[in-house]
Amino acid sequence: MQLKSFCPLKMNHKLDGLVFGLIISVLLLIHTREGQSQESNLPQIIKAMLGDDVVLPCHIKASEDPSQITIEWGRPDLKPRFVYVWHNQKEYLTDQNTAYIGRASLFHDKLNDGDVSLKLSNVTHSDNGKYRCYNLKDKTEYLVQLLVGSVSSPGISLAGLDTSSGRVILDCSCAGWYPEPEVVWLHGEGNIISAGPPETITDSDGVYNVSSRVTVEKRHNNYFTCRLQQKDINQTKETHIHIPDDFFIVQSDCSVSIGFNVVFALMLVFGVFFFIRMKQQSKKVKPNEELNQLMQDEKQKTKKSKLQEQLKRRTEEQEITDQQIQKLKDTLEKLKEQKKTLTDKKEKAVKELEENDSELKEIVEVNGYSKLKEIIIGIRHYLLDKTEDPQCLELMTEKLIKITEDEVNSLQEIEERIGNHITELQKKLKEMETKT
């Protein structure tokens, strides 16, 4: 069936636009089935990053008559499958898949040269798939595989302490990667550190959130690197961390385990909010394209749905922030109580030491009392040890109180920004509801 078979239909003024569109759809389906009998070529792989504009190449024989060009770009896995259709020197939008409205186009000035490549704007992960360029006149097809990748920078946090060996456990987390990345840990010298397989989860778009842990020992510089790499899209991201020597002290030395319990809780908070920030960075809002008036209502509904979804997500983040702030405040109160207890112990030990020194001065070095003086001197050394222990723990507790207070302030700032964003989203939704 040739394209010119459409001409008599066009001249029949009794057929309205709806019937004409239906006939075109039926004929496209018939020719698609005929074209499927040909041998399929292997798809060319086109790579892009989230939010980019991309061109899917396709070329046909140059035509002297533009009206003879009918091109269907489609995806067999979608319903409707039509991504973009060009017929009779204009766009055919009746059966176009709504996901591509306003984002798909041809280069009109190149059509006569046979260039029918498809331009997709602001690509997302849902655009991943196999595209079919079908020439209705020649019944030929060309396949293109689109791979939309996305990356984000990883974050490293302290996850705990191996008290038996004094080694530190590190956690590396990252959200918003596609395809799935490889995680590599490195020493400061660039040597790979052996680590177990990472934990991965995927969201509704198949995007990967990755977490990996490794146990490290004290080195001469204590610099460590978490690197994520994806060879298919040629992307690498890495983050470095320096661990102070004090964090490698074994539990028995100055009761470091008390500090690490708090540090562990703090690092869990860091991990949660790093995940939230990375998730926010991996999401991009689609810009408004030139849409015709007929699709304006549908676009408004989609935009409102996205705003509601974003509002729900930000509200959940605010609740998580509130919970983490409360946990840190509870921890802060416990630390302050611990510091008071340690201060009381230190003051009591100092007082006992002063009393012991006073008694020691009153002892006269005569026969029968030298042994007593020797005993009191031994007690003095014991009291000195008791003074040093609470003092050491008190200093550690003060440091942890400062870290906790700083983190509470930081989380409260994040909570304020989230609250401002929620207010902004609610305002936009209210404006949309007022217009409708």
Image (spheres, rainbow, N blue to C red):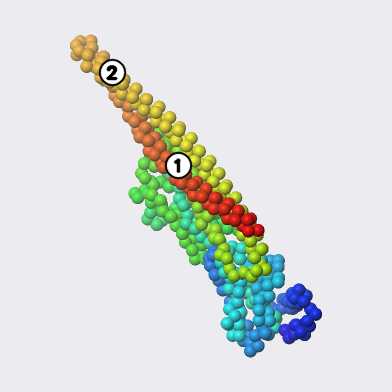
Placement of 183 over or under 26, stated as above or below: above
117 or 42: nearer the viewer: 117
140 vs 213, left or right, is right
Residue type pointed to by label 2: Glu
Choose top left, top right, bottom left or bottom right for residue 296: bottom right
Question: Quick check: 277 left or right of 353?
Answer: right
Q: Secondary structure beneath disc 1?
A: helix
Residue 103 place in picture, x, y as percent: 60, 69
Residue 371 in view in this figure: yes
Assess disc 1: are there few (<14), some (14-19) or many (≥20) residues with their C-alpha within 10 Å of its C-alpha: many
- At mark 2, the secondary structure is helix
**Residue 396, horizontal then vertical, whole percent:** 37, 36
Look at mark 2 in the image and give the residue it sits on.
Answer: 355
- Callout 2: few (<14), some (14-19), or many (20+) C-alpha neighbours within 10 Å? few
Q: Are marks 2 and 1 in contact (CB under 8 Å)?
A: no
- Name the residue located 35 percent from the left edge and 50 percent from the top edge: 221
Extreme-bottom residue of the structure = 64
Image quarter (top left, top right, bottom left or bottom right) of the C terminus: bottom right
Q: Residue at x 33, y 24 (%)?
A: 347
For the residues labelled 2 and 1, the Cα–Cα distance comes to: 42 Å
Q: Residue furthest front?
A: 434
Q: Quadrant of residue 253?
A: top left
Residue bearing mark 1: 408
Residue sticking out furthest to the top: 368
